[in-house]
Amino acid sequence: MKLKMFLFIFLLNNSYSIGQLTPPGLGSNSKMNLWFAIGLDQKLDSAGRFSSMTYFGFAGQSTVDDINVFDRLGIFVLNEEVKFKFKPAWSVSLAVSYRHQNEFEKNYPYLAAEDRFKQEFRLYSRIMKSWKKKGIPSIAFRQEYRKFYDPEFRDWKVSSAFRSRLKFQSEFDLVPAKRLSVIAGFEFLFSTDFEEASQEWKHFQYGETRLSAVISYHTKNNKISYNLGYMNDLLHVPAGEKSVHYISASVIFKNLF
C-alpha cells in the first residue's frame, strides 16, 4: 500500500491534469473487473467554452473467488455531461446518467435470487480547478444525487443517496510530441444513503478511495484517443478495508461534428 501511494504521489507531482473515462465502482462482491467505454468529446461552440462528453460503457465482473472478468456482466452505463469553461483554469459541469447493475451474492450460485438487477438514475455537478504550471494536479469536486429502483421501478432497499467526491488528477507526458501520456487519479468518496426499511438517512461518512492510472495515446490529428488503465478501489466495509481491482479500456472520439 505504501508503494502504491508513493507511485501515485510521484505522478501527481510531475504532471498536469486531463480527463478520462475511469471505471464505475461495482462494490465488494468481486475481485477483478474489466471496464470498456466508447465516448464522444464534442465542442459545442466556436470558442470552445462549452463542450459535451457522451459515453457508453459496460463491465465484466469476476466472483470473489477468481479473477475471470468474462464470467458475468456487471454493469452498463449511459452518461451525458456538459462542461462550461468560464475561466482558463476553471470549469463547471452538469451531467445525467443511467446505470443498469446486475446484483450478485458472495456465495455460489452468486446471482441474486430476487431483484437480480438494480437501476440507477444519477444527476451530478462538478467544479474543477487546473493550473498551467507543471507539478500541480487539477482538483475536482463532484456532488451526486443517486436514485435507485428494482427491475419493476419500485424503490430499491437503499432508494436514494447523496455522494461527494474529491479528486486530484494529472497527466505526465511520455514523449515530447505529447501524444503518449500517463494520467493518474486519486479520489476520495463520501456519502449518505436513505434506507426504505428505517425511513432514515444514514450518517454522512467516508466510503472509499480510488487510485487510477491510465496510459493514453492520441492520434496525430487529435481526433481519437486510446486509453488503457488500472484502478484500485479501496472500500471501507464492516470487516475493514477491501481492495477491488479494475482493468479499463476506452476509445474517445473528439469533435466529429
Image: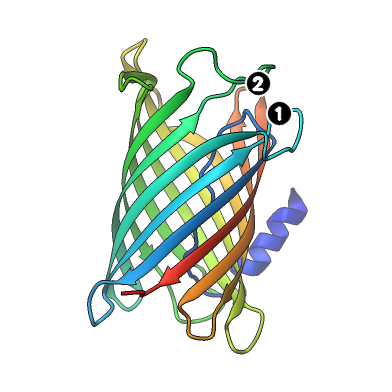
The picture quadrant where one finds residue 236 is: top right
Q: Is residue 42 above or below residue 185?
A: below
Image quadrant in which the C terminus is located: bottom left
Pinpoint residue 224: horizontal percent, then vertical percent: 49, 74
Location of residue 230 with respect to 16 vertically, above or below: above
**Image point 38% across, 21% down: which residue?**
150
Residue at which label 2 appears:
106
Residue positioned 54% across, 49% down in the render: 23
Q: Report which quarter residue 15 is drawn in.
A: bottom right
User: Where 181 sits versus 246, above or below?
Assistant: below
Q: Residue furthest top?
A: 197
Coloring applied to the structure: rainbow
Amino acid type, label 2: Lys
Determine whether, in the image, residue 103 is placed left or right of residue 107.
left
- Front residue of 148 and 226: 226
Q: Residue at x 34, y 15 (%)?
A: 196
Residue 22 location, x and y as percent?
53, 54
Residue at the disc numbered 1:
64
User: Whole-Å distance between the Cαs marked 1 and 2?
Assistant: 6 Å
Q: Amino acid at mark 1?
A: Val
Percent position (x, y) of residue 220?
53, 85
Question: Circle 2 — which element?
Answer: loop
Mark 2 and mark 1 in contact (Cβ < 8 Å)? yes
Position of 112 with respect to 166 (left or right) is right
Give the residue furthest to the bottom: 176
